[in-house]
Image (spheres, grey):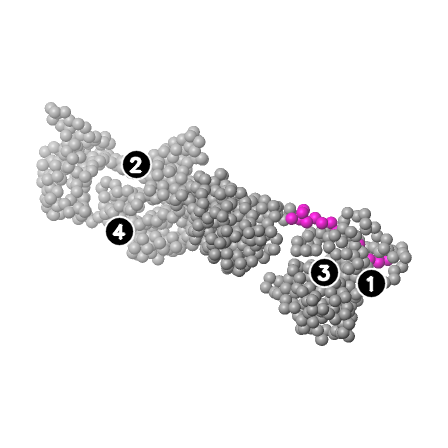
Amino acid sequence: MNPEYPFDDAATARAVIDDDGNLVEWNAGAERLLGHRAAEVLGRPAVDLLAGAGESGSVAPEGDRWDGVVTLRHRDGGAVPVWLLAHRVRPGVDGPDRWLVVTPLEGDGPRAPDDPLDHVGLLDSPCAIAIYDERLRLRRINTVMAEVLRLSEEHVRGLRAPELSGRAQSTDIEQYLLRVLTTGRGTDVRTYLPVGGDRTYAWLARMAPITDSKGRVRGVSVAAHDFTEQYLARERLQLVNEASVRIGTTLEVIRTAEELAEICVPALADFVSVDLLDPAEHGGESPTGRLTAPISLRRAAHRSVHPGNPEAVAEPGHADVYPTPSPQADALLAGHTIVASTSTGDLAQWLAWDPVRAERIKEYGIHATMSVPIRARGTTLGVAVLTRFENPDHFTPDDVLLAEEITARAAVCIDNARRYSRERETALALQRSLLPRSLPRTAALDAASRYLPAARSGVGGDWFDVIPLSGMRVAMVVGDVVGHGVQASATMGRLRTAVRTLADIDLAPDELLTHLDDLVVRLSEEAGTDGSPGEVGATCLYAVYDPVSRRCTLARAGHPSPVMVPPGGEPEEIELPAGPPLGLGGLPFESAELELREGTVLSLYTDGLIESRDRDVDAGHALLREALSASSESLDETCDHILHALLPPAGAADDVALLLARTQGLPSSQVATWHIPADPALVAPIRKQVMEQLDHWNLSEASFTAELVVSELVTNAIRYGTPGIRLRLIHDAATLICEVSDTSHTAPHLRRAKIFDEGGRGLLLVAQLTQRWGSRHTTDGKTIWAEIGLLGEE
């Protein structure tokens, strides 16, 4: 705001000199002082106005302010001794500096005896006081104000507030003065001005009108209180509070280091580098022993007031070695903050050792460094180095305390990020070790899978599995343990092992989930007694597919229903009884059975795939169906397409497990079935029919073993089972399966026969001749099965 003041601008001589020493502004007061018109002097060197060449140096002072007596040349050739006050004006970051040069021209002149400005008490006040007259020109100052300004009253009398400070901010002060002068009402003003030097002072000023005996406003008194220390303390507290909010927004070490650098520039330094010690190994602990020089540090982040960080010698990710003496090594070895400056020679030895940094320091005028060790929980993590070159001040003890406070907060966040990364890597390693490395090849289906850990919340307990069962059947399972971290991964491993064990005894899906629910209840009880965090909970989907009947039986425990894509059809969600989540205990589970055409694709997944903060579950299901409708012949490509379509680029908020399976059917020509009456005399004819069937299948190499196995299993069924006996042979390229079923629910077991026993060796013989054997319960009895490996099996 630049208002038009109703005062005589010619009462002060004022000129502006640019960075090259040429006059660029010349007011009426300057013309009045020296007689030169503006057109005659603008653009000319200011030194041309000096009466003596020896005084030319006085127009190039150091610092931001200068005052003194200079002899100038009048237009008529005479010499004019003048007291001048010069201020360096910094118009902007990229603009050149200028000098504002002023001097008052008018004295006080005659004043009335009752002039109220002469009767304001000044000397006894501890505050800095200034008196301005009706023209808003300085009339009087007390001793305290003179000490603050480092100028005498006789020199500054007659100057306006902008001319006294040389700063644009002071125009606001003059506006307040004018308001008090015109309204007659006092006001309080806070301002921040570099008065009397480079340091910026914070002032609380009370402006009050000065009236005469008739109540007319004749001037304004300004009583200023220096609250710089309180202001700086508040600024420091605000910076600390800001650091607590802005540092540690993520659990990423590099981002946390960047936040530390960002919060310190430009509030504390012009350039900040954050260098960290490498852990002992990837994901390991930071060194805890005594450090020795030289010290290897890796640049994590840096920040500068200049775009592109041109002052940096090391790039992020680059490791550098720091000897002693160096600011980094000295601070780490000493265990406390080290402040150094070029003026005192503290950096000379280090810079002699590192000429590249020496050249960079010289190029940018770096004059002060502060190295703050980054330590948390008794561990040294690295060092932050704060550097100044634009800021002319050296680091003060208050700066050191502030930097240490901010760095301490950042150190805890960096340590938390490292601990999180270490736990995440441990959980990932555990998770990968517990998940199947590859899916088994089966005649029942082709399968592909994907597992993605959560992007931020850590590794969870999602899992999947494909389990070969007897009779060419195969089980598919997908589950999700509640929670994240190592505990969830460990629980997942226990549940996956339990599912495999229960699947091995050929339980129906609903029965398997019931047993698994009991296990989760016990795990929750253990968690409550051994101090483990929280209760255990999980969801699970278990499905069994039979390629002979092409039927699939499924049951779920609080898990999302699978999506089915029939050959040439559209994706559809399979309707299943919901079932309670695992761990509630005592609630029933229900199975559903459906027939699947050969080539049907089943999609089993965890809720992390379809649930998101940005969309509801229905929208997730719609995206999944859309991705499946565009699936290719390759199940691996389809997995990748689904993940790309449903998950954000930055990663999912929760773990994701995905299992795709394309069903295959076993041709009826590869299955033979006989229904056998309970007559021992029929065992021999059955053996003969089996041999004929094997010859028809060109499996004569398996005839001897198959004959013995069939004879033993059928004989046992006739002798110990109940009527309704059935023999079934199933084969593919690698395996011949013999199954004998009856309506008895009593399962056989292997026993050791004594020397004189006539029986008891049958199942032992079967176990020795086959790859594996076992029994499974059915709805109407049991089935004994044995698998025989075929010649040429890979």
| Count of numbered circles in the view | 4
Q: Which residue is mark 1?
A: 107
> Residue 776 appears at what percent x and percent y?
24, 36
Check disc 2 and report the residue beneath it.
502
Comparing labels 4 and 1, the label whose residue is closer to the camera? 1
- Mark 1 residue crowding within 10 angstroms, few (<14) / some (14–19) / many (20+): few
Q: Give the distance between the C-alpha atoms of the residues marked 3 and 4, in whole angstroms.
A: 98 Å
Q: Which mark is residue 67?
A: 3
Is the residue 88 above or below the residue 678 in the image? Answer: below
Q: Tell me the distance, in whole angstroms, between the alpha carbons under discs 1 and 2.
A: 107 Å
Identify which residue, 452 or 704, lies in the foreground. 452
Residue 373: x %, y % from top left: 51, 45
Q: Amino acid at mark 3?
A: Asp
Contact? badges 3 and 1 (CB < 8 Å): no
Front tag of 3 and 4: 3
Q: Which residue is mark 4?
A: 598
